[in-house]
Image (tube, rainbow, N blue to C red):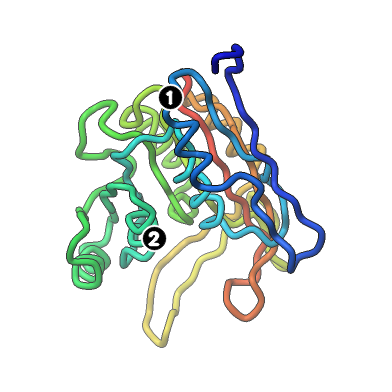
Amino acid sequence: EANSYTELKAEEHHTTHLHRKVEVKAEDHLTIAQNQHIKLGTGVSSLPYHHPLMLADRMVLLDHLTRGRVMLGCGPGQVSQFLAGSGLRTTGIDLSPGMIAQARLRNPGLGFAVGDMRSLPVDTAAFAGIVAAYSIIHLDDAARDRAYAEFARVIRPGGWLLVSFHVSSADDAPGSSRQVTEMLGRPVDVVGYFLEPAAVVDRLAAAGFTEWAREERGPVDDLEYPSRRCCLIAERTA
């Protein structure tokens, strides 16, 4: 900072999928955080084996991310627990009272609330950032636009959005949808949408976000639904 630098980009060294060495350590981030004008970014955005939660963990280390984040579509609270364990103060919001009940039961020390991401019960500019992990996939185009507008309303300028979603599968092209009528032996009525990343970026831009990083990858074998998926990090800029 004394030499007029304003930004640091932290790259990582990868030689094989088994060799992952982070070149910038947590203590370096803490040092940078003591400076007033230097922003810190990572150089990783498209490696196929990177899980969205790995990107979320990088976000936690960025010195320009403050506390006061919210998790949308939090389900039973596993991602909220992950973020809270990294030092963030989180509020998990889900449309389902049953999911919120489970989240509170499993994570008694964290905050959770029933709510609709299209009309959030919070003040304008109340949060430093939002994590929406695979929650926008159940909204049609118009509903997603309303959700993006709400994200922009409640995230303070300079805050951050992490959103992840399914892109395609062997039987589903980007832009298509699939209706599920049975799950775990019970009847359900759920529609899931496969989204084109460029289209999501365009709609987020219209709501006031600027793309900062994008990661597309295939599924983790024997663990995840067999789809190609995307994780986007965007800054609230307008």
Near-viewer residue (152 or 24): 24
Q: Which residue, given by chain and number where applicable, does mark 1 sit on?
A: 158
- Of 119 and 130, nearer the camera is 130
Q: What is the crowding at mark 1: few (fewer than 14 residues within 10 Å), some, or many (at least 20)?
A: some
Where is residue 166 shown, x and y percent of the image? 59, 57
| Relative to 57, residue 227 above or below | below
| Badge 2 amino acid | Phe
Q: Secondary structure at mark 1?
A: strand
- Residue furthest to the front in view is 2
Instruction: Give the residue furthest to the top.
Output: 4
Three-letter amino acid code at disc 1? Gly
| Residue at left offset 33%, top offset 27% | 153
Query: Which of disc 2 and disc 1 is earlier in sequence?
Result: 2
Q: Left or right: where does residue 97 sit relative to residue 38?
A: left
Q: What residue lies at 33% left-to-right and 42% top-to-bottom?
A: 69
Tell me where residue 32 appears, x and y as whole percent: 49, 31
Out of 216 and 117, give the one closest to the viewer. 216
Q: Residues within 10 Å of mark 2 (few under 14, many from 20)?
A: some
For label 2, the residue is 82
Percent x, y for residue 213?
Answer: 62, 38
Does 78 sit left or right of 216 as displayed?
left
- Taking 230 as reference, is 142 above or below it? above
Q: Is residue 46 left or right of residue 67?
A: right
Q: Is residue 130 left or right of residue 61?
A: left
Point 47% across, 26% down: residue: 207
Label 2: element kind:
helix
Quadrant where the N terminus sits is top right
For marks 1 and 2, give the CA distance.
Answer: 23 Å
- The x and y percentages for residue 113 are 20, 53
